[in-house]
């Protein structure tokens, strides 16, 4: 488990980082917290002759409320910063909660939101809830910034639409309308430091007791985070009850495209998806009604 020698570059600006990556060509990678990339280099899954560190780029840090009410979360925010940010907890608490479940304190203190997105591992924990919120990913080539819906960002396992020299600068979450509630549920084989066997994010908007808007997004059971349109079709315009919950769980299980691996079989994952979908939807509705509680106790 030895990493081959590489040259470490520490640019001062995004433009410099992009220029370096272009100039160094193949064998050069951006590195943020390194919690995905360094293990991949050790395992020989990736090779690198040059690492271009993003750590010095202040523009990529911080959480800000923008003039239109949306939240701009810098790609270099650590997972712990997202989980504990008062702004994130106020504007889109389900993202803070989801981020706080991930890994362990060491990983959350070192790993970044941008790294979680750009690595694009199918079981990554932050993408499903961000897709459910219709978040957007901001990318720059050093000259022009483009904004991509998070739903279009992931194109396959460990593959995104980000061009190799582009830096992810931030994630933008639009203001949540009145009557919104969201919840992320994941199932792991043990309590800490475990990757999701399956996960489900749900976001609802309630009006006069009926579901005006529903988004269900599955994680770890498809090559990319998977929105389940069938759940929206089933639930919009109705008041959630036990029968509808059961049907929504079934619809999500049918939409899942799980694989069998060391963490669980295809069949097991479908069962888990049905259970998590029911839990995520009923908690999202409870939160929209002001009854739900967020679980971030213990997170500093
Ligand atoms: C023990 C352990 C437990 C873990 N548990 C979980 C878990 O429960 N859930 C989970 O989702 N993940 C988990 N992870 C994975 C990892 O910690 C996260 O994915 C983390 O968010 C990665 O961020 P990073 O900053 O460390 O990324 P890095 O390793 O620095 O980078 C990852 C990739 O993204 C690219 N990149 C990073 N930032 C940018 C950017 N701004 N612009 C362009 N490209 C960029 C890099 O070039 C690299 O290819 C775990 C990892 C470990 C080692």
Image (cartoon, grey):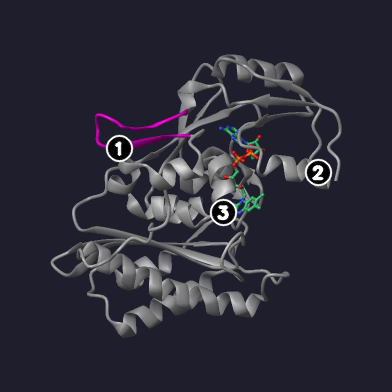
- Residue interval drawn in magenta: 61-74
Q: Secondary structure at mark 2?
A: helix
Q: Foreground: 247 or 94? A: 94
Foreground mark, 1 or 3? 3
Image coordinates of residue 49 in percent, x first then y, are 81, 27
Q: Residue at x 33, y 52 (%)?
A: 93
Q: Foreground: 211 or 202? A: 202
Q: Which residue reaches farthest bottom?
A: 243
Q: CA distance from mark 2 to mark 3?
A: 20 Å
In the rendered view, tell whether residue 84 sits above or below residue 247.
Answer: above
Give left or right: position of 256 versus 66. right
Is tag 2's residue or tag 3's residue first in the polypeptide sequence?
A: 2
Residue 23 appears in which quarter of the rendering?
Answer: top right
Residue with the mark numbered 1: 70
Give left or right: position of 128 versus 16. left
Image coordinates of residue 199 in percent, x first then y, are 51, 65
Residues at marks 2 and 1 touching, judged by CB atoms closer than 8 Å: no
Residue 228 appears in which quarter of the rendering?
Answer: bottom left
Residue with the mark numbered 3: 104
Is tag 1's residue or tag 3's residue first in the polypeptide sequence?
A: 1
> In the image, is the residue at mark 3 within 8 Å of ligand 1 by its beta carbon?
yes
Image coordinates of residue 159 in percent, x first then y, are 65, 45
Q: Secondary structure at mark 1?
A: loop
Give left or right: position of 194 versus 46. left
Is tag 2's residue or tag 1's residue first in the polypeptide sequence?
A: 2
Q: Residue at x 55, y 44 (%)?
A: 117
> Which label belongs to residue 42?
2
Q: Residue at x 42, y 40 (%)?
A: 136
Q: Residues within 10 Å of mark 2 (few under 14, many from 20)?
A: some
Q: Foreground: 272 or 31? A: 31
């Amino acid at each position: 488990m030895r990493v081959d020698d590489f040259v470490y570059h520490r640019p001062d600006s995004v433009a410099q980082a992009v220029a370096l990556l272009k100039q160094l060509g193949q064998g050069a990678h951006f590195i943020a917290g390194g919690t995905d990339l360094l293990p991949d280099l050790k395992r020989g899954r990736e090779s690198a002759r040059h690492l271009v560190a993003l750590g010095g780029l202040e523009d990529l840090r911080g959480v800000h409320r923008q003039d239109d009410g949306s939240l701009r979360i810098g790609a270099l925010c650590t997972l712990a910063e997202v989980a504990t940010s008062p702004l994130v907890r106020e504007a889109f608490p389900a993202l803070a909660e989801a981020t706080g479940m991930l890994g362990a304190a060491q990983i959350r203190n070192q790993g970044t939101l941008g790294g979680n997105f750009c690595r694009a591992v199918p079981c990554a924990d932050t993408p499903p809830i961000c897709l459910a919120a219709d978040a957007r990913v901001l990318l720059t080539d050093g000259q022009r910034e483009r904004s991509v819906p998070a739903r279009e960002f992931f194109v396959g396992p460990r593959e995104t639409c980000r061009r190799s020299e582009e830096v992810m600068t931030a994630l933008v979450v639009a203001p949540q309308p009145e009557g919104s509630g969201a919840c992320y549920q994941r199932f792991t084989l043990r309590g800490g430091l475990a990757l999701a066997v399956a996960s489900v994010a749900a976001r609802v908007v309630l009006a006069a007791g009926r579901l005006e808007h529903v988004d269900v997004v599955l994680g770890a059971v498809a090559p990319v985070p998977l929105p389940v349109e069938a759940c929206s079709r089933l639930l919009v315009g109705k008041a959630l009850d036990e029968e509808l919950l059961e049907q929504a769980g079934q619809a999500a299980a049918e939409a899942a495209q799980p694989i069998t691996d060391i963490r669980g079989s295809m069949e097991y994952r479908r069962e888990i998806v049905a259970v998590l979908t029911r839990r995520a939807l009923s908690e999202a509705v409870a939160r929209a009604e002001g009854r739900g509680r967020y679980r971030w106790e213990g997170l500093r």
